[in-house]
Image (cartoon, coloured by chain):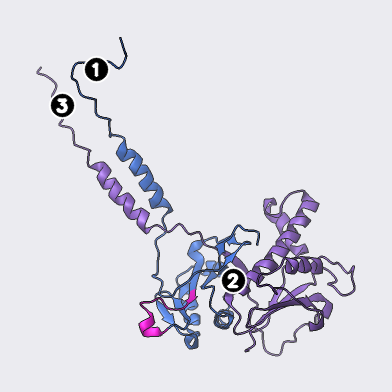
Chain colours: A purple, B blue
Amino acid sequence: MGKRRDLPEINAGSMADIAFLLLIFFLVTTTMDVDSGISRKLPPMPEENIETPEIHKKNIFVVLINKNDKVLAGIGSPSNMVEINGDGSISSSLKESVKEFVSNNGRSDNSSESPDKAVVSLQNQEGTSYDMYIQIQNELTKAYNELRDEKSNQDYGKDFDKLDADEQKLVKKYFPMKVSEAETKSN
Amino acid sequence: MSKFKKNGGKSMPAISTASLPDIVFMLLFFFMVTTVMRETTLKVEVSQPEATEVKKMEKKSLVSYIYIGSPTTTQQLNFGTKARIQLNDVTFSRKEVSEIQNFIISERLQKDEDEIPYMTTSIKADASVTMGIVTDVKQELRKVNALKINYSTKKNKDVN
């Protein structure tokens, strides 16, 4: 037998170049943005001749945003309302008053009867900026998230997002987020 | 004596680059798997508002996107600077907002029937647009019973 003949080795030196080329292509085309946002459920279109349920005034927390992005908030009638963003930024008083309003449980006469009955009514105008609207939505969500967190800590001893699905459902049922949005008024 | 004694004129052995392709391939696969190709080219300018209480969107295949913003500079020649609504690759003015109904219906046709209740509409609107146009969009969504919506926002960790 003669000497064992080696197969000529394929030169893999350019493999790295090819891989780099592909890598750079994917690096450039990739978009790392995770889609995130505030989820809401729209109310279905009202059916004809259906009576809108009467809601007691003290169960409604009204938030008004006008076309200059000024925010008023309060329970029931406009006379109780307070300006929220006098200095341009939203103060945390909105969140606090929403929390107080929702979790009142009938303790105070001019606040909601139970978290279940509490409704936040959000009204905006044609010229309201989307930015301000989202900030208000964010504050409202934050108020409810904190309430749910407190409730789940009290009942289960852990944060809301650490609960399992059934427990989350129960907490959500206790603090249902009811945000009603009237149609935009022009001007 | 010394360990680093030069052994007779012999040159330094080349560092083996044989494992370089492996490393690069690893990176490549990572990017291939994580990459999401942009389906549509944006014809409107969208810089989303910031919020803290955001949730990640699940089931991306069931999400339809509506972009709202003023046209990009190249589009401004045709459409001016007023905010427009982009559905797929076409933009519409506020007056043509009813096109959303067709858009949602055509999105539904592409999905299985049992997935339709889980479909979400993501509203990607520029922070500077006014609520007028957003409310119009929401009204159209209500008309076609596409009630699950998501206001797309950037995540902001700051505590206000």
How busy is the neighbourhood of tag 2: few (under 14 within 10 Å), some, or many (20 plus)? some
- At mark 2, the secondary structure is strand
Whole-percent x and y of residue A173?
A: 75, 63
Q: Label 1, label 3: how many angstroms apart (C-alpha)?
A: 33 Å
Q: Amino acid at mark 1?
A: Lys
Tag 2 subunit: B
Magenta span: B67-80
Disc 3: which residue = A6
Task: Characterize the local packing of mark 3: few (<14), some (14-19) or many (20 or more) Cα atoms within 10 angstroms.
Answer: few
The answer to which quarter of the image holds residue B12 is: top left
Locate residue A26 relative to residue A33 in the image: left or right: left
Name the chain under label 3.
A
Residue at the spot 48% in from the left edge and 76% down from the top edge: B69
User: Residue A50 versus residue B52: which sits nearer the camera?
Assistant: B52
Q: CA distance from mark 2 to mark 3?
A: 66 Å
Residue A56 seen anywhere in this rendered image of the structure: no
Residue A175 has which mark?
Answer: none
Q: Is residue B14 left or right of residue A82?
A: left
Residue ID for mark 1: B6
